[in-house]
Image (cartoon, grey):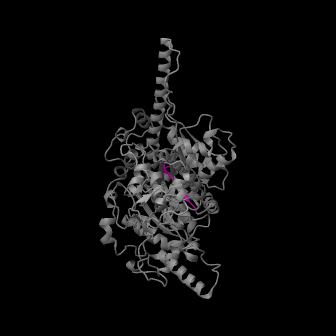
């Protein structure tokens, strides 16, 4: 087994071991206060020079945790799952009707992550929810959003009631004259948009919302899953669930057939809450193009609505005036209006009224939820979110990125000859399966591998269902229904079932093909031991999986979070090879871990720094020979060939250039 105990773990245990808390990740931008003035339109061609920000661009954003999560590991699964401060949802600030609906649905006591997230969501703050799989993240945002939707509906109904009373009073008094002042505008109705990687998770979110029912049996809040095959209902739902690509297809191809709301302008205006469930996947290479296009659309709408209030306050009549301001001042205005600009150093040509009241400014709420949120390097999703929302509240539990203490692990190395009997024995030896009481997931690497596993189970006389994207949609739905409704069900699946699938009583997860990376490993084992239950994981692995298996097994046995082992599927073994077989926790210098530093690696840089060093060597060689650099890293491609090889083939790694959730070509915060 490879040694995974980092030599710095003892010194950093105090600093690295987190507590269950709400926190903000450290930012890498250090600001130097400056005094700015707004340029007049006539001086646009010769603006006065202004000082900007001093920046420090290092590779590391947040060191991985290297100490065991001992504070919660010593407790039972139930104690680690439920809130320690509140016995009911009433303590979270939700309405009595919503609390009653939760109790009717079997949710009497909030979980820890729900306890931490609800207050910030109810206040309208941007929130990043990061906690272990099965901790209740969906309800952590569904419950407070449902409360806000119900409160909004009450305000609209109260406004209508008062209007009707005033009309009846005027009619009874015989006063037919029009009111001297225009009637107040009614409160607007806003919606929540939940983006998910696939329609299965969208349907799951809708089911969670619809489960909140009143005494009459009707849902307290309406919800619908939307895509081009499932057009929006006539009455727009309070909560809209969609995949990014499906929503864009609906917007672009409907031709306005479903009404103004289902246009870019409609969503920009009426969607007040944007939630990204499985946000690390949505902002990863495979989904990022559609996701970032939607986020850019909302960001443009946010800025436009803030400017509509901000410009009159500043006396700006020409948007070009604002565009000529230094970029930091524009960002301050979008984020906090006039007060933020003044705090940033803005000095208008004409003094502002010191007694003036500014705002209120439009503020859309963004919520990111994920069970894995890497934030070690600047290309990680967590770093991208931190850059786009520096004021966001980060809700985190200590068991984030860990194997829950209520999960028992068994590891089997197999060969081609021993694979089938070992797999069959793993299923049959499970007492719950033998009693036809438990449910089992068997993970395979892809659709073809899942079919091969199915063939093995069929030959061994093990009844099962199969779930992967190559199967017809009707077969996928039937497999999920069998898993949810029948005890003793064995489902062979791919990683399509590893994300967000919420079936509470899955007792056994088997990896017929070992996970390609630590993140997929976390999501697979997270299908069991959900909501404080116990579970077991049986991992079958081949000799080619040994480097990753040894690291993960050592971390699991120590109770250490797995974030130090995060990597792309093909990069873990490559990095192990580069360091001479010594595992180096991600983001830490090779020299500190006793590994060898290769030529081109700078002092103080970790494994990821070598690719940049080699890129610089190639660039120097190219300049010396006068070549055009074709076939090497192009301009702005920091990592050169080594970095490019590590990028997923399925799409563009949008985080490679520092993390821009505004999208390609969009002006960044």
In the visual, does 30 lie left or right of 317? left
Going 62% across and 52% down the picture, which residue do you hit?
245
Give the quadrant of the N terminus. Answer: bottom left
In the visual, does 305 lie left or right of 355? right
Find residue 639 and report its horizontal and vertical position in percent.
54, 74
Find residue 210 and report its horizontal and vertical position in percent.
52, 38
Find residue 448 and report its horizontal and vertical position in percent.
65, 62
| Residue 132 image-quadrant placement | bottom left
402 or 38, which lies in front?
38
Farthest residue, direction bottom: 625
Going 33% across and 63% down the picture, which residue do you hit?
17
Q: Which residues are magenta?
A: 434-444
Give the answer, above or below, for where 626 lies relative to 269. below
Going 30% across and 72% down the picture, which residue do you hit?
11
In reply to whether residue 170 is colored magenta, the answer given is: no
Q: How many marks?
A: 0
456 or 325, which lies in front?
325
Is any atom of residue 246 visible in this view?
Answer: yes
326 or 479, which lies in front?
326
| Residue 10 image-quadrant placement | bottom left
Give the answer, above or below, for where 546 lies relative to 480. below
652 or 391, which lies in front?
391
Is any atom of residue 483 visible in this view?
Answer: no
In the visual, does 273 lie left or right of 69? right
């Amino acid at each position: 087994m490879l040694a995974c105990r980092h030599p710095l773990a003892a010194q950093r245990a105090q600093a690295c071991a987190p507590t269950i808390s709400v926190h903000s990740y450290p930012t890498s931008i250090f600001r130097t206060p400056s005094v700015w003035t707004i340029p007049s339109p006539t001086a646009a061609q010769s603006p006065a020079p202004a000082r900007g920000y001093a920046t420090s661009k290092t590779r590391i954003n947040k060191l991985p945790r290297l100490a065991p999560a001992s504070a919660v590991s010593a407790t039972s699964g139930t104690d680690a799952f439920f809130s320690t401060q509140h016995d009911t949802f009433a303590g979270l600030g939700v309405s009595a009707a919503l609390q009653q609906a939760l109790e009717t649905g079997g949710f009497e006591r909030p979980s820890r992550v729900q306890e931490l997230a609800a207050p910030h969501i109810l206040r309208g703050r941007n929130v990043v929810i990061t906690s272990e799989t099965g901790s209740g993240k969906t309800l952590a945002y569904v419950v407070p959003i449902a409360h806000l939707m119900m409160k909004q509906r009450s305000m609209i109904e109260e406004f209508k009631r008062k209007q009707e009373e005033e009309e009846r009073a005027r009619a009874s008094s015989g006063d037919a004259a029009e009111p001297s002042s225009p009637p107040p505008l009614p409160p607007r109705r806003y919606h929540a948009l939940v983006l998910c990687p696939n329609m299965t998770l969208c349907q799951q979110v809708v089911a969670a919302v619809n489960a909140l029912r009143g005494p009459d049996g009707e849902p307290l809040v309406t919800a619908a899953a939307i895509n081009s095959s499932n057009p929006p209902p006539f009455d727009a739902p309070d909560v809209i669930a969609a995949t990014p690509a499906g929503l864009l297809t609906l917007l672009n191809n409907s031709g306005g057939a479903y009404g103004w709301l289902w246009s870019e302008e409609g969503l920009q205006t009426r969607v007040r809450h944007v939630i990204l469930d499985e946000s690390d996947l949505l902002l990863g290479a495979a989904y990022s193009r559609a996701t970032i296009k939607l986020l850019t659309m909302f960001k443009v709408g946010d800025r436009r609505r803030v400017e509509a209030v901000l410009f009159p306050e500043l006396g700006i009549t020409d948007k070009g005036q604002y565009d000529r301001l230094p970029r930091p001042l524009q960002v301050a205005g979008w984020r906090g209006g006039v007060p933020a600009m003044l705090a940033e150093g803005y000095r208008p040509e004409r003094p502002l009224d010191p007694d003036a009241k500014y705002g209120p400014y439009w503020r859309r709420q963004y919520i990111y939820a994920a069970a894995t949120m890497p934030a070690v390097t600047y290309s990680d999703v967590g770093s991208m979110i931190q850059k786009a929302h520096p004021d966001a509240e980060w809700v985190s539990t200590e068991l984030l990125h860990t194997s829950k203490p209520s999960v028992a692990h068994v590891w089997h190395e197999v060969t081609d000859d021993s694979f089938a009997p070992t797999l069959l024995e793993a299923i049959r030896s499970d007492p719950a399966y033998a009693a036809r009481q438990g449910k089992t997931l068997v993970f395979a690497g892809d659709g073809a591998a899942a079919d091969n596993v199915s063939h093995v189970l069929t030959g061994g006389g093990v009844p099962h269902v199969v779930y992967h994207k190559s199967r017809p949609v009707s077969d996928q739905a039937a497999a999920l229904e069998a898993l949810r409704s029948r005890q003793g069900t064995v489902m062979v699946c791919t990683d399509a079932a590893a994300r967000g699938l919420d079936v509470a009583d899955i007792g056994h997860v088997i990896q017929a093909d070992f996970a390609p990376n630590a993140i997929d490993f976390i999501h697979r084992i997270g299908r069991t031991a959900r909501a404080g239950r116990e579970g077991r994981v049986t991992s079958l692995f081949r000799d080619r999986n040994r480097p990753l298996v040894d690291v993960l097994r050592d971390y699991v046995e120590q109770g250490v979070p797995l974030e130090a082992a995060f990597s792309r599927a093909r990069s873990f073994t490559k990095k192990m090879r580069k360091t001479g077989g010594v595992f180096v926790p991600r983001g830490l210098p090779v020299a500190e871990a006793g590994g060898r530093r290769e030529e081109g690696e700078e002092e103080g840089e970790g494994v990821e720094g070598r690719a940049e060093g080699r890129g610089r060597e190639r660039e120097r060689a190219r300049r010396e020979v006068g070549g055009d650099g074709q076939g090497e890293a192009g301009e702005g491609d920091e990592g050169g060939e080594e970095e490019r090889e590590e990028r997923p083939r399925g799409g563009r790694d949008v985080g490679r250039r520092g993390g821009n959730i505004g999208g390609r070509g969009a002006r960044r915060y």
